[in-house]
Image (cartoon, rainbow, N blue to C red):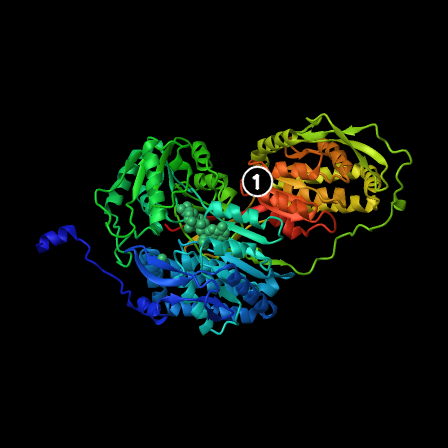
Amino acid sequence: MTLTELMETLPYGPAPEAAQSALDWIQAHKGRFQLFIAGRWRKPASQEWFTTLNPANSQPLAEVAQASAADVDEAVKAARKAFASWSQTKGHVRARYLYAMARQIQKHARLFAVLETLDNGKPIRETRDIDIPLVARHFYYHAGWAQLMESELAGYGPVGVVGQIIPWNFPLLMLAWKIAPALAMGNTVVLKPAEFTPLTALLFAEICQQIGLPPGVVNIITGDGKTGAALVEHPGVDKIAFTGSTEVGRLIRKATAGSGKKLSLELGGKSPFVVFEDADLDSAVEGVVDAIWFNQGQVCCAGSRLLVQESIAEKMYAKLRARMEKLRVGDPLDKAVDIGAIIAPVQLQKIQRLVQKGVEEGARLWQPSWAVPAEGCFYPPTLFTDVAPASTIAQEEIFGPVLAALTFRTPEEAVRLANNTRYGLAASIWSEDINLALDVATQIKAGTIWINSTNLFDAASGFGGYRESGFGREGGKEGLWEYVKKTARAPRAKAVAGKTRAAQPAPAVPPIDRTAKLFIGGKQVRPDSGYSKVVYDPDRHPIGEVGLGNRKDIRNAVEAARGAFESWRKTSGHNKAQILYFLAENLSERAEEFARRIAQQTGQDGAAEVEAALEALFTAAAWADKYEGVVHNTPIRNVTLAVPEPIGVMGILCPDDQPLLALARLAATALAMGNTLVVVPSPLAPLTATDFYQVLETSDIPAGTFNLVTGERDELAKTLAEHDDVDALWYAGPQAGWALVEKASAGNMKRTWTLPASGPLPDLDETLRQATQVKNIWVPYGA
Ligand code: NAI
Ligand code: MG
């Protein structure tokens, strides 16, 4: 090749990163790793081992222990033992340990990066410049929260022993996302890395030893799904945090249902990448590269659906194909490689199968002219155009370097297409018009929105899903709530005296003439079943009748709530507050009647409860325009807006005590946050709720916003839990019912909140959080 030719083509020469130090580290362990339990290395009770490979050349790297249920038990015991003192360790001391972890990771950054690339197959450019720096950042950031916990999370303490199960796509980064907040809040952990990528977690275990972390605070157990399942089922675990496939997430939701274990799930996605005609197209093309070819597309929030405005679609595709032709796939240790190896043959086959399906379903396939290396696990960047919105490749998570492109004409259509998925993890929006971009950002149902950017992550920003992408957040202050629970209860405002009915004697001849109806879509309706049931007072005297609602009534109520949601969501906080104040005003007009009714049903002091309920309505109204988000301090020229949003259609099954206060505290708070509701009153005191809809009718609550169905609690709860158009469910009732609703809600992965049938109502801060989900909107700037 002449010098001139060389100057014209500028071919890349190999620029490999040396692997020796990582291989030496493996060798120092004689190529075989035990379990890290109570600060020591232990042989697995099973005496079983498995091999982890380098996906770039299919060569074995090391043997790793397969933890059995007995080993899981040992690890949980060690974590429990350590919890006693770790939970009492001062925040400042915990901060020092987290700080030490961050420092050690930085000091050994290249070793971690190379080891990660060897075990996972992702390009060294990514492990070196993205994964490992973010890991260190995560530990630093959470060292700060450990330091601040006492003042900023007053009244909260750790949950206990946390079981953490992570996937193979960002092995060390997911470890950091899990371990840093858990330890910061005073929990101890048992973490199971993915079976394809255990090595960096084991190197991290050594760091725990080096910094003198007390034994048992962090335990690392390797193994496959069986090990994960044993951890999930272990009764000594107080919380499970999982990242991985929606299928396994669903299994875990069912396995933990009713156990009282706290749960957070970060699952799959099919995130839209929306390009409007006024976007900076060259930037958008680079964005696509980061969105779908970062980490070979094996990213839960990968921008795997390109939605492009019709007027610029062909131009965008042409630029994209030209860019794809120049991407380099190959040895992940080569510093000039863009796309590395796919994690394993099974994943490669899944990609191939779904691409084949795309072709069969009529989409147009395009791949670059060059071939990927024959040895190892590689797949070329792939573009599908002419993709039908309902086709498999537009709906299913491929988890590979495959992009499905669809076109739209108007912003409304873009939003509809973007939301045409069961997932809701992330979205990327490209437009030079900030009005349009932010308007669309508020309408896309996803936990993270990037404007003119994509795949930005930081410890200060929360990350997590809407819908079937899971629930819970990692990062930001919002992520801390997953790892704490209330320690001290705030004194109850205006405690309702647990007195007798003497205060408000029930009328001697109770009225049984009026049969209450259901309240659906702003109208009083008779139950579909045509049955009513008698309501009794605590002495078993009949005091009225309510309709016996069934599945059909619930379906109608959900439909009404769904229909009302968009406009209620968009109603300003100020107007929502006005409506709630008006409701309080109308309720106070009828205070005596309500007080009598409460006393009659519960034998408690009705007047005090009405007072408390009025105050609770005022509180809900007050929060309607004050429950604000924050601007996260992410370290680029950027504002990251953490915005609390309503969850959507919520089912609320009310507790038995304080029927009016429960409505005011639970339902009104949920309404204030912009949700629309299907409320099922307690079977013991439903008449307060049926009286309440009459107050609603005279207030300005829009039809369908608040719907009421009376009937058998668990039957209606099950229907609500199974309903795919219900986004969240609050269930107050007996403990057996908790398992029922948690299990039945796994279908669409709705958020559930289970509460005791009676006793004090939950605190307001928790109620507000349960009524909202945080969306993080990243808006980079720079002229
Ligand atoms: P997976 O969900 O099976 O694995 C994730 C983790 O869960 C691993 O540590 C695994 O050992 C563990 N696990 C598996 N079965 C379990 C069980 N029954 N109970 C408890 N833990 C269990 O994911 P897999 O099989 O590696 O990948 C399959 C598909 O999942 C991918 O093609 C991709 O579509 C999706 N996926 C999504 C991820 C995300 O970040 N959203 C990450 C990894 C996979
Ligand atoms: Mg491996």
User: Which residue shows up at 62% across the image and 52% down it?
Assistant: 259
Q: Residue 516 location in percent, x, y? A: 76, 30
Give above or below for 705 relative to 372: above
* Ligand 1 within 8 angstroms of badge 1 C-beta: no
User: Which residue shows up at 28% across the image and 67% down it?
Assistant: 20
Residue topped by disc 1: 727
Query: Along the line of sight, which residue is nearer the eye, 286 or 111?
Result: 111
Ligand 2 picture quarter: bottom left
Q: Is residue 779 visible?
A: no
Tell me where residue 491 sits by quadrant. Answer: bottom right
Residue found at the very far front of the displayed protein: 47
Tell me where residue 196 sits by quadrant. Answer: bottom left
User: Which residue shows up at 61% across the image and 65% down it?
Assistant: 150
Quadrant containing the N terminus in the rendered view:
bottom left
Give above or below for 208 relative to 729: below
Label 1 residue SS: loop
* Left or right of 530 on screen, residue 334: left
Query: Quick one: label 1, few (<14), some, or many (20+) residues within 10 Å?
Result: many
Residue found at the very far right of the displayed protein: 508
Q: Is residue 542 visible?
A: yes
Give above or below for 309 relative to 40: above
